[in-house]
Amino acid sequence: MTRRLLPHPLLTTLLIVVWCLLINDITLGTVVFGAILGLLIPMATRAYWPDRPRIRNPLRLVSYLGLVIWDIIVANVQVAMIVLFKRNADMAPNWVVIPLELRTPEAITMLAGTITLTPGTVSADLSADGRALLVHALDAPDPDAVRDDIKSRYERRLKEIFE
């Protein structure tokens, strides 16, 4: 019964929080309406989520989100410095292929989203077999270093969280 009403409890909680942030007011009515949305949206989309993603270690997920937020802040400063002070001729944009050890679609999606959210990098494509991710880096004189950084900083942590 609980699984039927709350097929995705984290999504429900996230929807309530996002609704309150969008309204920019925390009143009883806002929270109640957010809870209604948080219950109805996951129930309406339940058919599209046949297998609920397993999060093996939720605390690691929280630390991962903190790391990503920090990296976004640092990358914003780095991209601003590149845009303001680096000549186009001195930039080294590169395509980087990231071989993936991740196998779950949720973990791969989270990795691709993390890469895209971090300024200066964009995940562009996933190989047909799901074993490699194509990433464009704004300034990467050493593409191998970018690959190794993504694998050690993000993929390793996501593997601990999801697999």
Image (cartoon, rainbow, N blue to C red):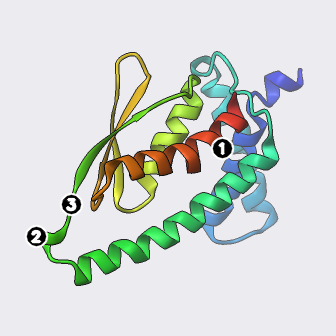
Q: Residue at x 50, y 65 (%)?
A: 72
Q: Secondary structure at mark 3?
A: loop
Q: Secondary structure at mark 1?
A: helix
Q: CA distance from mark 3 to mark 1?
A: 28 Å
Residue to which mark 1 is pinned: 157
CB atoms at circles 1 and 2 under 8 Å apart?
no
Residue 44 coordinates in the image, percent (x, y): 62, 27
Task: Answer left or right for 88 relative to 100.
Answer: left
Q: Residue at x 49, y 51 (%)?
A: 149
Residue to which mark 3 is pinned: 92
- Residue 89 circle label: 2
- Disc nearest the viewer among 3 and 1: 3
- Residue ranking furthest to the bottom: 85
Q: CA distance from mark 1 to mark 2?
A: 35 Å
CB atoms at circles 3 and 2 under 8 Å apart?
no
Relative depth, front residue between 159 and 44: 159
Amino acid on which disc 2 is placed: Ala
Residue 122 coordinates in the image, percent (x, y): 34, 49
Q: Secondary structure at mark 2?
A: helix
Relative depth, front residue between 97 and 66: 97
